[in-house]
Amino acid sequence: MKHRVAVRVLIVTLVCVLTAGQAFAISPVGSTQFNVQAHINLSELTRGNFYQKVTPIAKTEQDLSWFGFDGLCESQVRAVREFTQATGIVTKHTCVEGDQGVQQLLAEHQAGKPSAADVFFGPNNSMRTLTQAGVIANLPLAGLLPNAVDVEKNAALASRGFNHGGTVVPWHRNQTALAYNSSIVQNPPDTFDALLEFARQNSGKLTVTDPTKGGSGGGFLESALLNFSPDCKQDYYNFDLTKEQAESVAQRCMSPVLAYWRQLKPYVRFSTSNSDSVIALGNNTALVATVWEDELYQEASKGLIPPTVRPILLKSGEVGDGDGIFIVSSTQKLEAALLLIDFLMSEKIQVEKLESIGSRTARQQLKTAGQIPPKLAQYLVPDAMYRERTRPRINGLISDAAADIFVREIIAK
């Protein structure tokens, strides 16, 4: 009976998130009770009255603690400084290694100790574990925060396949892509068939990251699975599979991918890291390469990439991902934490993050055209192409198993 009640509550919560109505008062996600202490009546809180109810209390809560994992720490420090200036709420940011931060939160929670962090920005693949342990406050943030009203639905409700119901806000998004030198490649390949033809005509000028050594290669392999084995899509997005089941799916669905790669391999150079693929573009060893869009952008901002390099997504789609931010359930400063996360999703911070490190936003109505310096904007996939062709990452267990098969059957032979 309790399970049925929890399911009904979760369904109601998801409906509120998807409709994004300002009149709906929030309900706890996956439960009949909130697992976090508040100074305001959470059952009366809506997107419409958010600032009115939250701000006065939030401004009395000082020394807010935000743990953010490495990679985006510089942007986080700048955002904290701007938040404190805008609100007067003193906030400390601590840069942590992602998995270590997760383990610290779990250990503190299991020991019954107050967490050292009120807010945590961490890796998406840890959100299932953190939710099941009770570390994440069960607040439907995606349906509550005014600055999250236009967040893309899949990103708003799920983290790498785990449906958390909106408790984790997608602060950072990234995207796998192909990048090419436009001064030489006049008609960039935008299908797998066109990529094969390009490679045949430009042997050795296509660089692909080994999927076991770089995420851009893994993302490219996932994109190939989605394209060549569409009948397996239901399995790809089944995140409840055991490791053995995932390995069986990979074995069954890799056949057409391997057939394609056996044709492509003679003309390809494999790199051993994401950075090596970007470097190959920078020194013209490669004319086309698999990349992370944000890494390409960051290297370009340092002047390490030719101004003629451009990113593109294949018409069949390429996978993207990201990482989220949530409120720790043991916080004693809930209102300040709510105000911080809403501020982090504001247009100002989201555009600054994109401009400084190429970190995508999940906000669909946010216009970036004209806000990013033209000399750097060219290293980002155009917004319309991004929205049309980005795809969610598949089950990581399937991806890992497929990568091992790829190395064994393609790279090692």
Image (tube, rainbow, N blue to C red):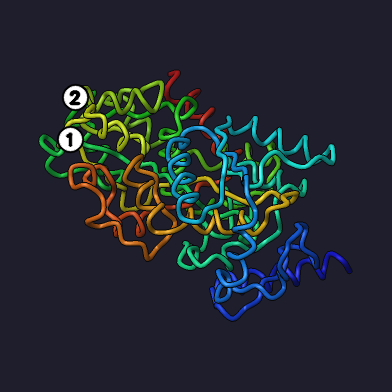
Above or below, 231 against 395 in this view is below
The answer, for residue 235, to whether it is visible in the render is no
Is the residue marked by circle 2 packed among few (<14), some (14-19), or many (20+) residues within 10 Å? some
The residue most toward the top is 412
The answer, for residue 370, to whether it is visible in the render is yes
**Depth check: 181 or 240 in front?**
181
Q: Earlier in the sequence, mark 2 or mark 1?
A: 1
**Depth check: 256 or 236 in front?**
236
Q: Position of residue 395 (x, y in %)?
A: 58, 45
Task: Tell me what residue is drawn at x 36 percent, y 25 percent.
Answer: 275
Local SS, label 2: loop
Left or right of 368 on screen, residue 168: right
Task: Tell me what residue is drawn at x 31 percent, y 53 percent.
Answer: 315
Task: Tell me what residue is drawn at x 82 percent, y 70 percent.
Answer: 5
Q: Where is residue 134 in the image (x, y as percent from the top left)?
A: 77, 49
Q: Which amino acid does label 1 sit on?
A: Asn
**Depth check: 98 or 340 in front?**
340
Q: Position of residue 324 (x, y in %)?
A: 55, 48
Quarter of the picture containing the C terminus is: top left
Please identify the quarter of the rendering in which residue 196 is found.
top left
Local SS, label 1: strand
Mark number, residue 181 = 1
Q: What residue type is labelled 2?
A: Asn
Q: Determine the CA span between mark 2 and mark 1.
A: 8 Å
Query: Which residue is denoted by mark 2 in the rendering?
Result: 284
Q: Mark 2 and mark 1 in contact? Answer it, CB < 8 Å.
A: yes
Task: Tell me what residue is drawn at x 18 percent, y 42 percent.
Answer: 375
